[in-house]
Amino acid sequence: MHALKRDWGTMHVRHKGGKGPALVFINSLGTDLRMWDEVCGHLPQDWITLRMDKRGHGLSETALEGYGIPELAEDVIAAIDDAGLASAILVGCSIGGLIAQHVALMVPEKVQGLVLSNTASMLGAAEGWHARIAGVRENGMAAMAEGILPRWFGPKMLANPNAPLWRTLLARTDQEGYIATCAAIAGTDITDRLGEITQPALVFGGKHDLATPPEVVEALARNLPRADLVMFEETGHLPAIEAPEAFAEALVKFVERIAK
Ligand SMILES: O=C(O)CC1=CCC(=O)O1
């Protein structure tokens, strides 16, 4: 556990050293770095992992406003530099995948490859995010969290006794941090820059994903110059939680193929 000082506050970072390759994990909206716990448990012991909580999430402090996805990408770059990594493979889920795409555009020399789970170059229409922000302001996080779970998980995970733990995490996410993150997503569309991301990429989707449905991740894989696609049959939006073993297996195969 490490507290990384940023100009907006303190960011919670976890860095596990090793021989390499180095993997940087970037979590989704309303989760924290624990979403990668089980995936990391299935990786080779000597691999380097770096995880962090976004602003307003987990143990990181909240930055109220005035930031977008590029500033969240700068936080990731700062964590990579702080860990002394010259380059890494980025693994991002949903907004984490959008942040990863930004990092690849901003500092391509630091990015060896990308694993883009259930994400896109634009995460839904801005109006939807503004409506969500209004709903959270009016009713609070707990009321919103109840309706989000079926967007996150496929039927198998919804029936899992652990599913409510993730709803609790979401309900306890700092309201202002959550709203600021939704606002950052709302203004972002980098579709016309996807051709510039020339690193090898692995795109994950889930047949039951209501947030980034299969056709959305298929389009991302098609528009990236060097992407392969894996579509999980039984998962929704968060396969790293729903099927960590299958996630890790595909991830390890990809990393072994591309790591120098
Ligand atoms: O909360 C959702 O609807 C799912 C989601 C969208 C962006 C993200 O990171 O998670």
Image (cartoon, helix red, strand yellow):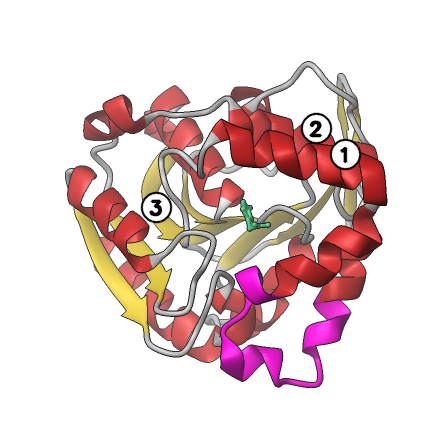
Side (left or right) of 54 relative to 62 = left
Cβ–Cβ below 8 Å for labels 1 and 2? yes
Question: Label 3, on which residue?
Answer: 114
- Quadrant in which residue 17 is drawn: bottom right
Q: Position of residue 218 (x, y in %)?
A: 23, 52
Q: Position of residue 180 (x, y in %)?
A: 70, 28
Side (left or right) of 135 relative to 194 = right
The residue range painted magenta reads 150-166
Q: Which mark is residue 177?
A: 1
Residue 165 on the magenta span: yes
Number of numbered discs present?
3
Question: Label 2, on which residue?
Answer: 180
250 versus 115 height, above or below: below
- Quadrant in which residue 136 is drawn: top right
Q: Amino acid at mark 2?
A: Ala
Q: Earlier in the sequence, mark 2 or mark 3?
A: 3
The residue nearer to you, when weighing 243 against 91, is 243
Q: Residue at x 63, y 67 (%)?
A: 37
Q: CA distance from mark 1 to mark 3?
A: 26 Å
